[in-house]
Amino acid sequence: MARSGIQIGKVCEQTGLSADAIRFYEKQRLLECPPRTEGGFRLFNTQDIQRIQFIRRAQRLGFSLPEIRELLIIERDEGETCSHVRELLQAKVAQIHSKVAELRVIEEQLTKKLRKCERKLKASGDSHRGRCPVLDEIGRRGSDEN
């Protein structure tokens, strides 16, 4: 008895994912195990492809796999889904704000170190002799504060 469905190669073409990524989603239980042909090939349906695309879009929004799993569970529920999704979005936005603040601090630190390099090179006539003050700083204990 032949089964109908879409084999993984075609799913890869439609979703832009590799077969390994699709199998990984399956192992992470983001996808249900699809039926297989007598030869052992996975057979996906259009709902599986829609779910894979949902996962990809959620990842592009910065959601982790456990968060995506939660979104998928919420999506299946028939209850107050929007308020739960709002809470997840609020948490994600707060994480992003925190990460942006961290990146600004790192940018400031790197900019200061770049200025030191430029001053050193200007003072030495672009000579590459001698120790780099930035490497010395990074190598010192307690340089995390700089």
Image (spheres, helix red, strand yellow):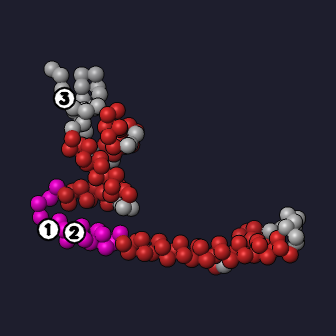
Horizontal and vertical percent position of residue 5: 21, 32
Dot 3 or dot 1: first in sequence order is 3
Say which residue label 2 marks: 84
* Residue segment shown in magenta: 76-92
Q: Label 3 to label 1, Cα distance in Å?
A: 36 Å
Say which residue label 1 marks: 80
Which of label 3 and label 2 is nearer to you? 3
Q: What element carries label 1?
A: loop
Q: Label 3 to label 2, Cα distance in Å?
A: 36 Å
Does residue 99 sit above or below 43 in this rendering? below
For badge 3, the amino acid type reads: Ser
Using a 10 Å C-alpha cutoff, classify the residue at mark 1 as few (fewer than 14 neighbours), some (14 to 19) or many (20 or more): few
User: In this view of the protein, which residue sits in the foreground, 77 or 56?
Assistant: 56
> Which residue is at a point 14% across and 68% down the rendered structure image?
80
Name the side, left or right, on which 51 lies relative to 22: left
Dot 3 or dot 2: first in sequence order is 3
For badge 2, the amino acid type reads: His
Horizontal and vertical percent position of residue 66: 33, 57
